[in-house]
Image (tube, helix red, strand yellow):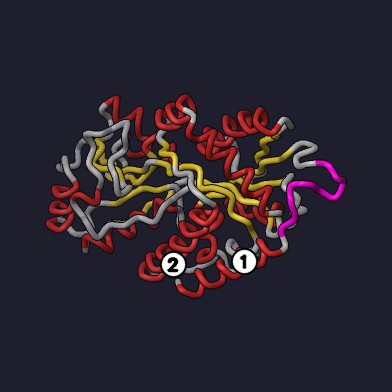
Amino acid sequence: MGFWLKTACAIAALAASHAPGLAQSSGKAWPERPIKVVLGFPPGPVDIVGRPVAARLQEALGQPVVFENRPGANGSIATEQVMKADPDGYTILMGTAGTHVTAVHLFKNLRYDPVKDFEPIIAAVEPATCLVVHPSVPAKTVAELIAYMKANPGKLSYGTTGVGSVFHLTGELFKQTTGTEMVHVPYKGADASMVDLIGGHIPVVFTALSTAGPHIEAGTARLLAVLEPERFPRRPDTPSITETIPAFRKPSTWFGYFAPRGTPQPVVQRLNAEIGRILKEPDIQSRLQDAGYAVIGGSPEHLRELMIDGIARFGDIIRTAGIKPE
């Protein structure tokens, strides 16, 4: 982890020393034309954050802000394209912990370096995630689930959005910190795993709270805990899993904004300030919390720190689980 931190600091210092002001080569102040925000996934959960922010950012900057989905290869295709874009502040990426953290360990031939090839702008949100079980599982708390699993080793299986997904790794972390065994069942998407859970085909699922919410309300899934260190404000009566398992420290699974390396620091700072302000607007915060997100915000360096911490800690989970890059 020390290596990653030293590398990141050196890159940040180099970028700052060469950063021009907001005036571009044309002599006009940035921005003077439309800005493109690229997301490497099909329309879905990240759009819930990205599109409202893009609309407010357009108002703040006085230029069109186009939000574009470019799905493929778990976000890596779009991420590489943004890496190669001109570092002029007109192409930015909405990245995730999948594109900028776990990809380091899961792809043999990743064609970008999340730390070296991008200027972090701001960590936007943390999706609330959760542990849910089918109502037939004889456990109403995390402690009861652990006790049941230890009394019935290997009996339960857990569903996630796929091999190497943050939910798969969260399930592996659960096993590692509790000394229990479960069989991983990967699905092509969160909805598919929940369909099998409510159908009684799989007993446990690690997923987003926004995905599980309707089924929890309908009584077809039982919510045991949220997986972040703190309770989620919209569900204050639901415990954090760390209240039962203090050693359970899931790395942050943030969504955040990045620019290509070499983007002028004044542009990065302007984007950080504007997006940070938008995320704090009461109606935006309320909308995001209703959708299952907690606002993060903070400096570009904070996003860099989250990224470096995640690379180290998800790497430990992956190595311990014996998951090999493809």
Residue 9 x/y as whole percent: 56, 67
Residue placed most toward the observer, 46 or 3: 3
Pointer 2: what residue?
A: 312
Q: Is residue 119 left or right of residue 26?
A: left
Q: Is residue 25 magenta?
A: yes
**Rounded to the nearest whole Å, what is the CA distance between mark 2 and mark 1?**
22 Å
Q: Which mark is residue 197?
A: none
- Amino acid type for the residue under numbered disc 2: Ala
Residue at 55% across / 53% down in the picture? 300
Q: How many marks?
A: 2
The local secondary structure at tag 2 comes to: helix
- Amino acid type for the residue under numbered disc 1: Ala
Q: Is residue 30 above or below residue 76?
A: above
Q: Is residue 307 magenta?
A: no
- Disc nearest the viewer among 2 and 1: 1
Q: Is residue 44 above or below residue 182?
A: above
Crowding near the residue tagged with mark 1, few <14, some 14–19, many ≥20 C-alpha atoms within 10 Å: few
Mark 2 touching mark 1, by CB under 8 A?
no
Residue placed most toward the observer, 274 or 248: 274
Q: Main secondary structure of the magenta part?
A: loop
Q: Which residues are magenta?
A: 19-28
Crowding near the residue tagged with mark 2, few <14, some 14–19, many ≥20 C-alpha atoms within 10 Å: some
Residue 184 x/y as whole percent: 35, 55
Pointer 1: what residue?
A: 13
